[in-house]
Image (spheres, rainbow, N blue to C red):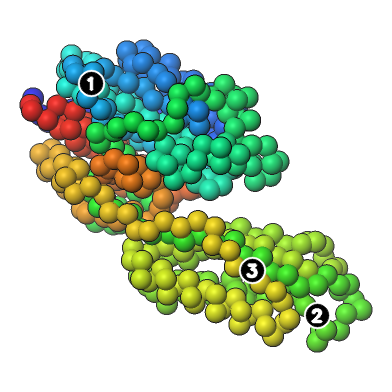
Amino acid sequence: MRNLQITGERLWASLMELAQIGATAKGGVCRLAASDLDGDARRLFIRWCEEAGCTVRVDKIGNIFARRAGRNPTLPPVVTGSHLDTQPTGGKFDGAYGVMAGLEVVRTLNDLGYETEAPIEIVAWTNEEGSRFSPAMVGSGVFAGVFDLAEGLARPDNVTGVTLGAELERIGFAGAEEVGGREVAAYFEAHIEQGPILEAVQKPIGVVTGAQGQRWYEITVTGQEAHAGPTPMPRRRDALVGAARMIDAVNRIGHAHAPYACATVGFVQVSPNSRNTIPGRVFFTVDFRHPENAVLTVMDTELRQACDAAAAPIGLDVDVKEFWYFPPTPFDPRLVAAVRGAAEAQGYPHQDIISGAGHDAVYMARVAPTAMIFVPCVGGIRHNEIEDARPEDLTAGCNVLLNAVLGRASPEI
Ligand SMILES: [Zn+2]
């Protein structure tokens, strides 16, 4: 009964239809968490799940669970999915692929009249991207007990300050279910790769063995605002000059720990941001990643030293606040082996890989056996409108997902 096959054309058609919600002129998708468009995508997903015979529930942080019953209703479910929100210039597949792959697994089992022992649930997590409401992965984070519910709902929109809770209410997705606190037999997430590795080695399946650790910082540099004309150079306390040197140091720290370290400054606010005023205050973010905790600790020390070294000569105050941290996360060895086994059984070339990005699976790994399946993205580009994937790779990943899920949901067969 193993080596069942999904219908690749149906998976592709669903992805393309979903991508029309928030479609951008450059072929990407802009569907920010808890926006009207996110609401539209959620309603389409729910309609498809109900048409596939699933029972749909929404929890208090807006996570959607679509359940296909198993023969034994007392067994905890095998859960698979990802997220429907995107970055402002997101692509068609980041997140959407994992959710639609879960739906395609259910549709395939329906076509075959295949009854599993355990129930299967397709999940769409709220606010994975963290672009509109930071931090990222709030829905799965509350589910896994990383954040409490009130904290998650109170997260403000980065621009307007309206809360995630208020926006979920407005779009009709402040659900009634308690968040988490129930057993999950296994969690699988299919996702496009966030880098160029699988494409380079020409293998359709990445067997994800775990995720890199991450440390995120918020840095505030304070000097003194002054008029650009009358203030002589030696008397200036220019916060932007100090911040620029710190940003350069962040980049150097990343290079110093090659090839696995990543170090990024992606958000900068200059105050007052006026062309004839010396900047008095700069706020910027730092994102450090590495698969080893020990290296992240060294990078942390180097960052703090570099900030102090840049601030002192200009007479600046610098506040380095660690905003978010999670340690490197190994996935469940049995589930990782199940993914590898499913790829082998299907004859797909595969390679073990470490996830360089945060995914809902990283939080789920704290409360349930978890594994991920990566498929190549063309050009290795993600968080970009031109992100692309080949239909045959998406089909391969979904076939692996189907058989890995079946192995957990009907282990005796
Ligand atoms: Zn994603």
Q: Is residue 165 above or below residue 106?
A: below
Answer above or below: position of 221 versus 361.
Answer: below
Q: Quadrant of the C terminus?
A: top left
Q: Is label 3 in a helix, a strand or a loop?
A: strand
Instruction: Tell us which disc is closer to us: 2 or 1.
Output: 1
Residue drawn at x 66%, y 72% is 318
Q: Amino acid at mark 3?
A: Asp
Mark 2 Cα-neighbour bin, 10 Å: few <14, some 14–19, many ≥20:
many
Q: Residue furthest right?
A: 230
Residue identified by numbered label 2: 236
Q: CA distance from mark 3 to mark 2?
A: 19 Å
Q: CA distance from mark 3 to mark 1?
A: 52 Å
Circle 1 packing at 10 Å, graded few (<14), some (14-19), many (20+), is: few
Q: Position of residue 304 (x, y in %)?
A: 55, 75
Asked whether disc 3 touches disc 1, contact meaning CB atoms under 8 Å apart, the reply is no
Of the two numbered discs 3 and 2 in the rendering, the one whose residue sits closer to the viewer:
3
Of the pair 86 and 235, the residue shown nearer to us: 235
Q: Give the spatial CA distance, label 2 vs label 1.
A: 69 Å
Asked whether residue 342 appears in the rendered view, the answer is yes
Give the residue number, with chain letter if any, for mark 1: 74
Question: Which is more toward the observer, 214 or 198?
Answer: 214
Callout 1: helix, strand or loop?
Answer: loop
